[in-house]
Image: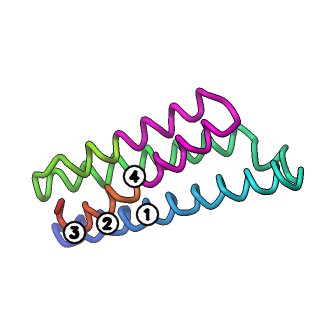
Amino acid sequence: MRTAILALRDRLDRAGIILSGLCAVHCILGVLLVGILGLGGEVLLAPEIHRIGLGLALVVGLVSLGFGVARHGKLAPLVIGGAGLGLMGLALAVGHGPAETVLTIIGVSLVAYAHIRNLHRGG
């Protein structure tokens, strides 16, 4: 049972890293395609995409980083990930534009870093 929980936590951390990367790519491509070429604004900038992404990040992040604290007893990944999730939430509040992009990129970077630290047992 314990091995299954550890495997699940590791999978969730890896999923969190992948989701963070996809979010960053979406954000950068969105700025390029919409800002420079004027393409895809109604799809790439849809608030639903950002809300769903934040919801997935919250669930995956809190579960896997919470498992990590229970396993290795180190709060640092949870705190770093929480700060990143907070920045991602703030990005939703500021609306579309450069501030949203910067907050999102910093937020997903922190979340990915937290998942990496968690995979390395909090180190």
Q: Position of residue 61 (x, y in %)?
A: 38, 50
Q: Quadrant of residue 93?
A: top right
Task: Report the predominant secondary structure element of the magenta stretch.
Answer: helix
The amino acid type, in three-letter code, at marker 3 is: His
Residue for point 39% across, 52% down: 111
Residue 61 appears left or right of 106:
left
Q: Quadrant of residue 67?
A: bottom left
The amino acid type, in three-letter code, at marker 4 is: Val
Q: From the viewer's perspective, is the residue at label 2 or at label 1 nearer?
A: 1
Residue for point 21% across, 68% down: 120
Residue for point 75% across, 43% down: 45
Q: Position of residue 39 (x, y in %)?
A: 88, 53
The residue carrying mark 3 is 120
Residue 113 appears left or right of 51:
left
The image shows residue 118, relative to residue 84, as above or below, that is: below
Say if the magenta span includes residue 90.
yes
The residue carrying mark 4 is 111
User: In the displayed image of the protein, which residue is found farthest to the left?
Assistant: 73
Tell me the number on the disc at residue 58: none
The residue carrying mark 1 is 17
Estimate how packed mark 3 is, as few (under 14), some (14 to 19) or many (20 or more) residues with alpha carbons within 10 Å.
few
Q: Secondary structure at mark 1?
A: helix
Cα distance, mark 3 to mark 1?
13 Å
- N-terminal label among 3 and 1: 1
Tell me the number on the disc at residue 8: 2
- N-terminal label among 4 and 3: 4
Residue range highlighted in magenta: 83-110
Q: Secondary structure at mark 3?
A: loop
Q: Position of residue 59 (x, y in %)?
A: 42, 46
- N-terminal label among 4 and 1: 1
